[in-house]
Image (cartoon, grey):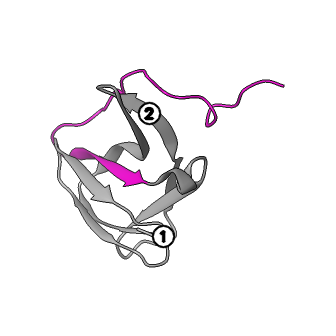
Amino acid sequence: MAETYTERVHTEKAVLDIGEDIGALVIYTGREMLGKEIEVSPKGNYALKIHTAVLERKVNGRTLFAALFLELSEGDYITLTTPSSEIMIIGGLVTELYCQASGC
């Protein structure tokens, strides 16, 4: 059976498209979230849902489990998880969020 994208360990570098009014978000999780989707929405516009999968990554010899949002418009966001978290995205910067097993 063929390996799926979420099953393999990702060793390649992520390419971010940030600057001016575009930022990025990294949500670190535990192994239990591997392959699951995480959604975020701009605060106040919950109809616009942006999602990405949690992948296993090797970075500097360490194993991480993370969801990468490579290009988000500057503004306030909320994770669509229980419990949810509020995040501020700033253009040109990478925002990091650390999630527990119970949610983000």
Q: In the rendered structure, which amino acid carries the disc numbered 1?
A: Leu
Q: Which residue is mark 2?
A: 57
Circle on res. 46: none
Horizontal side, residue 65 vs residue 97: left or right = right
Of residues 97 and 89, the one drawn nearer to the viewer in this rendering: 97
Answer with mark 2 or mark 1, whichever residue precedes in sequence.
Answer: 2
**Circle 1 sits in a helix, a strand or a loop, which is it?**
loop
Q: Which residue is mark 1?
A: 80
The residue drawn where x is 61% and y is 47% is 35
Residue 98 image point, x, y percent: 32, 59
Q: How crowded is the residue under tag 1: few (<14 C-alpha within 10 Å), some, or many (20+)?
A: some
The residue drawn where x is 49% and y is 27% is 10
Q: How crowded is the residue under tag 2: few (<14 C-alpha within 10 Å), some, or many (20+)?
A: some
Residue 71 image point, x, y percent: 34, 42
- Is 88 part of what is drawn in magenta? no
Horizontal side, residue 78 vs residue 50: left or right = left
Q: In the rendered structure, which amino acid carries the disc numbered 2?
A: Arg
Residue 11 image point, x, y percent: 43, 22
Residue at the farthest right position: 1
Query: Which SS does the magenta portion mostly show?
Result: loop
Above or below, 85 against 71 in this view is: below
The residue drawn where x is 31% and y is 32% is 16
